[in-house]
Image: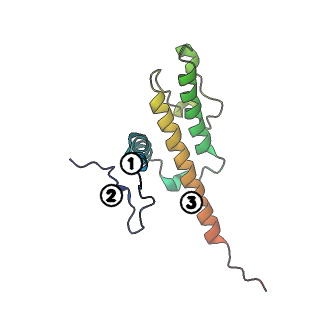
Amino acid sequence: MTDPFTAQSLRLTPEPPIATATSEASLHFLTGPALRLVIAERMEQIEQHGYLPDGDLMYDQAELALAGKSYVDTYIDLALYPEKSPRARHDIPDSWPWQHDFWKEPGLDDQTKALTKGIALLLAELDRHLAAMAIIHAARPLHTPE
């Protein structure tokens, strides 16, 4: 069985690798559990739930960043206030940008899941932002100063 997250498979073809590990610590980061969890969550968002990068372009009011913030804030609440009543934890964060039906409440022991979802949504926002900037840049007419 091959691991789909080997350092080799992280390279985009035909582009060169985005990073090369020059130390044990950076190799651990590139192939370690944190990045693997975030990549797996983002892939699930795309492949299983149909949240495609092209569709993300319609979120032009920082909705993906706000959704990521909501899950990161939930992680922080779970980490800092473990004694908080379970009922109070079911309050949807004020930053949640969509209908309440779309909120997936992390379980009481799901700090990792909440943080992973938050980071994956922030990564989706970064991808959306970069794609939008590329579109804007490509749409600008060539200007030659006189």
Counting from the top left corner in percent of width and height, residue 35 is at 43, 44
Mark sitting earlier along the chain (1/2): 2
Query: Which numbered mark, 3 or 2, is in the foreground of this view?
Result: 2
Question: For mark 3, what is the residue?
Answer: 131
Q: Which amino acid does the dot numbered 2 rest on?
A: Gln
Q: Is residue 40 left or right of residue 101?
A: left
Q: Residue 24 got which mark?
A: 1
Locate residue 15: give its quadrant.
bottom left
Q: Nearer the viewer, residue 42 or 75?
A: 75
Q: Amino acid at mark 1?
A: Glu
Label 3 SS? helix
In this view of the protein, can residue 57 be seen by the observer?
no
User: Does residue 8 appear to the left or right of 49 in the view shown?
Assistant: left
Q: Is residue 66 left or right of residue 25?
A: right
Which class describes the residues within 10 Å of circle 3: few (<14), some (14-19), or many (20+)?
some
Cα distance, mark 1 to mark 2? 16 Å
* Marked residue nearer the N-terminal end (1 or 3): 1
